[in-house]
Amino acid sequence: MARVAVLGAGAWGTALALQALRAGADVALWARDPGRAAAMVAAGENTRYLPGLPLPPALRVTADPLAALEGAALILLVVPVQGLRGVLSMLPDFAAPVLLCAKGVEAASGKFPLEILAALRPGAAGILTGPNFAAEVARGLPAAAVIASADAGLRATALTLLAGPGFRLYGNDDAIGAQVGGAAKNVIAIAAGAVIGAGLGENARAALVTRGLAELSRLTVALGGRAETAAGLSGLGDLVLTTAGTASRNMSLGMALGRGQALTEILAGRAGVTEGVATAPALVARARAAGVELPLCEAVAELLQGSISLPDAISRLMARPLRDE
């Protein structure tokens, strides 16, 4: 039985650990906080992030990274992008291939997750991404995702160890496009939420999501990815899910902004990370460096920074020069 180490015991890490168990792997789930690990073992569930969902006895929860990594054939690193560098710096050496399971752009450097990993821990690596809510994957509801990596062997290993009857996985060698999709969709979801929260209607949301996809695709191609990746699960698929309702943290944050709630107040009431907040200005900066214009994402970044109001942002977008689609 192959061993999978899942590093990060939030909602998504726990869900992926449960899926790896269902797929037949021997799974260790690492929680950085020893108190959190002990509480999960004692309660038999992740009460903070997935309350009411029992953790099987076969799932080994530990706060010891050495114990989690020992003998692993595959490592799933499920850490928010803004904390990825710090977690990598504290982990012991490892040789197993790594799948990063986070979406965003590092605010301080403008780097995507695989770029951070390559700088600190070079080796076989890829991205697991797609239209997935953690709670649904944890419950075993049908879902699909993408394993994106230039390493064909890693893709094959990950597909074998993680796929199952309820979790359809696809390989893709365009890791750049997969990372752009995962980052940009969170920013666009904040915009979609703001539109709905402000009562601007479904027509506005549909137009925004469609033009957001165009921005996502432009940036993907400019950074060396493929346009068809933007039309797949890691792009369009994730964008559809994230802009569809309040189960998305980014969508719900945007809705609260649209209703006039302050960003600091929204974030203070949340346990999980809303990646689009830190990603928006970093993604815009990355796009500008590549000579790509992202008017929707730029508006979101300014809205989050408080330098523009929602009505002014809408007016500016609607007043852009007319042109062919």
Image: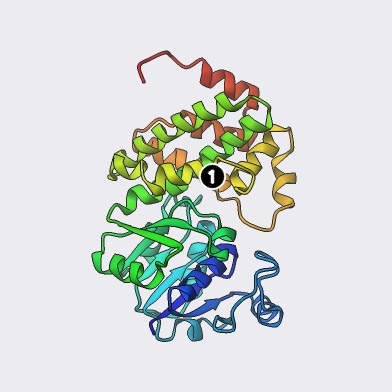
Quarter occupied by residue 125: bottom left
Q: Position of residue 295 (x, y in %)?
A: 47, 28
Residue 124, above or below 176? below
Apparent side of residue 88 relative to residue 98 in the rendered image (left or right): right
Residue picked out by circle 1: 242
Residue beneath the point at 42% across and 73% down: 75
Q: How is the image coloured?
A: rainbow
**x then y, percent, for residue 137:** 53, 61
Quick one: quadrant of the N terminus?
bottom left
Depth order, front residue of 201/176:
201
Q: Is residue 279 left or right of residue 115?
A: right
Disc 1 residue type?
A: Thr
* Residue at the (34%, 42%) spot, across then down: 220
Q: Position of residue 61 (x, y in %)?
A: 58, 80
Looking at the image, can residue 239 be seen?
A: yes
- Please report the residue visible at 57 percent of the width from the left and 34 percent of the height from the top: 191
Q: Image quarter for residue 293?
A: top left
In front of the other: 123 or 23: 23
Q: Residue at the far front: name it.
A: 165
* Mark 1 secondary-structure assignment: helix
Q: Is residue 49 above or below residue 311?
A: below
Q: Is residue 121 visible?
A: no
Looking at the image, the residue that sits furthest to the left is 152
> Residue 161 at x, y = what percent?
38, 73
Residue 194 vertical placement versus 121 (above, below): above
